[in-house]
Image: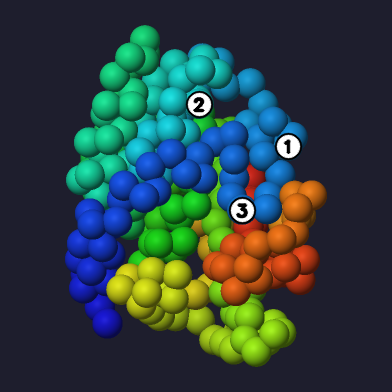
C-alpha cells in the first residue's frame, strides 16, 4: 500500500474516531504505564519558549504548555476534527496559537530554525516516512533546541493474551506497514524496531539525550489481561517509550 493511500485511510478513520481520544494521553502524561513529565522533568523550564506539537490532537498538551508559560503555541495534525477541537480548547490562551492541518511527513511551510521545543505525544508512530518526519522536525528547531516524543513500545503489540497466557504472535524484527488490531484493522501503522527510531534520529542529525522505557504500574491489577493496555502485559513488556534528543 502506497503512503498516500495509508494517509488517506488513516485520516478518514481519525475523522470518525477522534472524539474518543479527546484529552487522552496528553502532557504531563507520556503514555500508558509510563512515568509522567512531573516525575521526569525532560523539558525543564518551558517559560518563554516557542513550542511545536507534532500530532497535536485535541490540543490538551499545548494547553499544558501554555500553563507552563510557553511564549508561542504551534500544533500540527492530519485530522480536521482534531484541529477544530484544539482551536476550541486553546481559545482562552493569552499567547499566540497557530494550528496547521497537515501530514507530519510534509512541511506545510512552518518556519526553519524557529522553535525551542518540538514534541510529539503518542502520535509520531503514525508517520509513513520516519526519516522525513525527523528531518522536518530537525529543520524546525533552533540549534540547541530539544525534541521529545513518546510512542507505543514496538514490543507491545507483538504480545497477545490467548488461552490464559501471553504469547508473541508477531515478529518484532519484521518492519513495515500493517493493519492495527487496536483500531479493528481499519487503520495502518508502520511497525518499527526501537533501534530504527534511534538510528533515524541520528541520521537526521539529532543527538540522543535519553531513552526511557521504565514501567510505572498502578497498585490495582484487577482488569482483564486481554485489554490492549493491561497491567498484566505491562509486567512483561513496556507499553510506552520516550526519547529526548537535541539539535546540534
Quadrant where the C terminus sits is top right
- Mark 3 vs mark 1, CA separation in Å: 15 Å
> Can you tell which quarter of the image residue 14 is in?
bottom left
Instruction: Pick whichever of labels 3 and 1 is earlier in the sequence.
Output: 3
- Residue 32 shows which numbered tag? 3
Label 2, label 1: how many angstroms apart (C-alpha)?
15 Å
Tag shown at residue 40: 1
**Callout 3: few (<14), some (14-19), or many (20+) C-alpha neighbours within 10 Å?**
many
In the image, is residue 185 above or below residue 12?
A: below
Q: Nearer the viewer, residue 169 or 243?
A: 169
Q: At which x and y percent is residue 178?
A: 40, 80
Question: Residue 1: horizontal and vertical position, in percent?
Answer: 27, 82
In screen coordinates, is 194 left or right of 117? right
Q: Depth-wise, is mark 3 or mark 1 nearer the camera?
A: 3
How far from the left and from the top, in percent, is residue 217? 76, 53
**Residue sitting at x 55%, y 18%:** 68
Specify the label residue 129 is tagged with: none
Labels 3 & 1 near each other (Cβ < 8 A): no
Q: Given this view, does label 2 or label 3 mark the residue nearer the observer?
A: 3
Question: Please, what secondary structure does the residue beneath circle 2 have?
Answer: helix
Q: Position of residue 149 (x, y in %)?
A: 55, 48
Crowdedness near tag 1: few (<14), some (14–19) or many (≥20) residues, C-alpha within 10 Å: few
Mark 1: secondary structure: helix
66 and 218: which is toward the camera = 218
Question: What element does badge 3 sit on?
Answer: loop
- Residue 208 in sight here: no
Residue at the spot 50% in from the left edge and 81% down from the top edge: 175
Does residue 174 appear left or right of residue 37 in this picture?
left
What residue do we see at 59% from left, 50% from top? 31
Q: Are the residues at dot 2 and dot 3 in contact (C-beta closer than 8 Å)?
A: no
Q: Which residue is mark 2?
A: 64
Amino acid at each position: 500500500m502506497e503512503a498516500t493511500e495509508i494517509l488517506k485511510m488513516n485520516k478518514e478513520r481519525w475523522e470518525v474516531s477522534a472524539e474518543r481520544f479527546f484529552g487522552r494521553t496528553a502532557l504531563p502524561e507520556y503514555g500508558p504505564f509510563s512515568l509522567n513529565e512531573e516525575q521526569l522533568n525532560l523539558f525543564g523550564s518551558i517559560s518563554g519558549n516557542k513550542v511545536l506539537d507534532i500530532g497535536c490532537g485535541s490540543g490538551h498538551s499545548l494547553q499544558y504548555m501554555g500553563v507552563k508559560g510557553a511564549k508561542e503555541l504551534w500544533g500540527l495534525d492530519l485530522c480536521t476534527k482534531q484541529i477544530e477541537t484544539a482551536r476550541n480548547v486553546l481559545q482562552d490562551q493569552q499567547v499566540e496559537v497557530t494550528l496547521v492541518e497537515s501530514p507530519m511527513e510534509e512541511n506545510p511551510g512552518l518556519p526553519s530554525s524557529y522553535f525551542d521545543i518540538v514534541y510529539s505525544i503518542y502520535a509520531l508512530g503514525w508517520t509513513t516516512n520516519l526519516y522525513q518526519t525527523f528531518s522536518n522536525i530537525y529543520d524546525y528547531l533552533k540549534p540547541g533546541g530539544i525534541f521529545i516524543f513518546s510512542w507505543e513500545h514496538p514490543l507491545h503489540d507483538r504480545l497477545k493474551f490467548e488461552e490464559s497466557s501471553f504469547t508473541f504472535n508477531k515478529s518484532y524484527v519484521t518492519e513495515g506497514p500493517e493493519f492495527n488490531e487496536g483500531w479493528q484493522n481499519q487503520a495502518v501503522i508502520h511497525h518499527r524496531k526501537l533501534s530504527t527510531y534511534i538510528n533515524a534520529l541520528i541520521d537526521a542529525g539529532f543527538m540522543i539525550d535519553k531513552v526511557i522505557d521504565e514501567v510505572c504500574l498502578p497498585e490495582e491489577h484487577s482488569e482483564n489481561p486481554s485489554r490492549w493496555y493491561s497491567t498484566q502485559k505491562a509486567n512483561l513488556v513496556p507499553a510506552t517509550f520516550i526519547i529526548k534528543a537535541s539539535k546540534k
